[in-house]
Amino acid sequence: MREIVLDTETTGFEPSEGHRIVEIGAVELFNHVPTGKTYHQYINPERDMPTEAFQVHGISEEFLRDKPVFAQIAQDFLDFIGPESKLVIHNAAFDVKFLNAELSWVKKPLIEPARAIDTLMMARRKFPGSPASLDALCRRFGIDNSSRTLHGALLDSEILADVYLELIGGRQPVFGLSIEPSRAQSAAVEEDWRPRPRPVPLPSRLSQAEADAHQAFIAKMGEKSIWLR
């Protein structure tokens, strides 16, 4: 099973207001294991970079000026994510909204929202009432994010991959090598079980003196005692 852990950085919050994607980072997982394949691209948004966006991302207009526009990288991005791989995204609605806006503007196929696995929703369901930001989840799971002084799409994707693996049950896959029987096997064993006599009776722990005392006590109870039947 192939999954793509994905993150974008943008100039703002709404593509309908003219904001654009300035960076995409993605990490490939196969059967929940990172393959080492990544996708990373800076993008010229063809618009001013707001001061607040620069403060969050640390990406300047000058830096982005010679980068390709989205139309130039759209197909390479689609080729990397493929047509069917699930997309693991923190706050998926935000990233999918921006990606589909960019794709629609260059007349490329859109991403089906059903392809997205939203780790923000996963964390909120698993830890209701607790902070669910990427930084908060790193603290919860003991994941080192010390290099995350600014938002960066590829770094955030790599960190999110670690968080995702923790959210689905931990980073150590079983690979089918567990020695514990499956539930079905256990149920079958229980259903077939029948009590059987011991092949060798357990030795008595009663001493001869205790046996003699017991017999003397029963004799005093009379001939009708149930112990003599």
Image: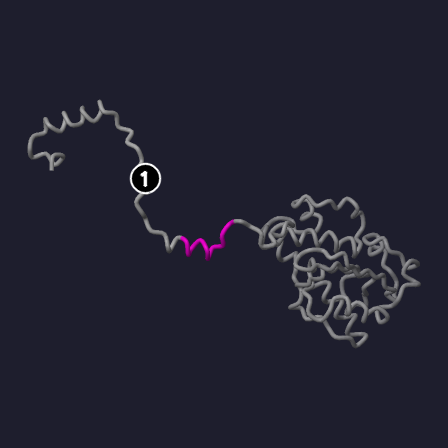
Query: Quick check: 59 above or below 76?
Result: above
Q: Residues within 10 Å of mark 1 (few under 14, many from 20)?
A: few
* 143 left or right, relative to 217: right
Q: Which residues are magenta?
A: 180-189
Q: How many marks?
A: 1
Q: Nearer the viewer, residue 18 or 223?
A: 223
Horizontal and vertical percent for residue 152? 80, 54
Q: Which residue in the rendered view is the most extreme toward the left?
A: 223
Q: Is residue 183 magenta?
A: yes
* 21 left or right, relative to 228: right
Q: Going 73% across and 57% down the picture, which residue do you hit?
A: 35
Q: Is residue 206 magenta?
A: no
* 179 left or right, relative to 212: right
State whether the magenta stretch is mostly helix, strand or loop.
helix
Q: Quadrant of residue 43?
A: bottom right
Q: Nearer the viewer, residue 160 or 223?
A: 223
Q: Amino acid at mark 1?
A: Val
SS at badge 1: loop
Q: Nearer the viewer, residue 195 or 123?
A: 195
Image color mode: one colour
In the picture of the structure, the residue carrying the numbered disc 1 is: 200
Q: Which residue in the rendered view is the most extreme toward the top?
A: 209
Query: Quick check: 92 above or below 174?
Result: below
Horizontal and vertical percent for residue 114? 64, 68
Horizontal and vertical percent for residue 74? 81, 70
Horizontal and vertical percent for residue 140? 65, 45
The C terminus - image quarter = top left
The N terminus - image quarter = bottom right
Q: Going 81% across and 75% down the picture, which residue do you hit?
A: 106
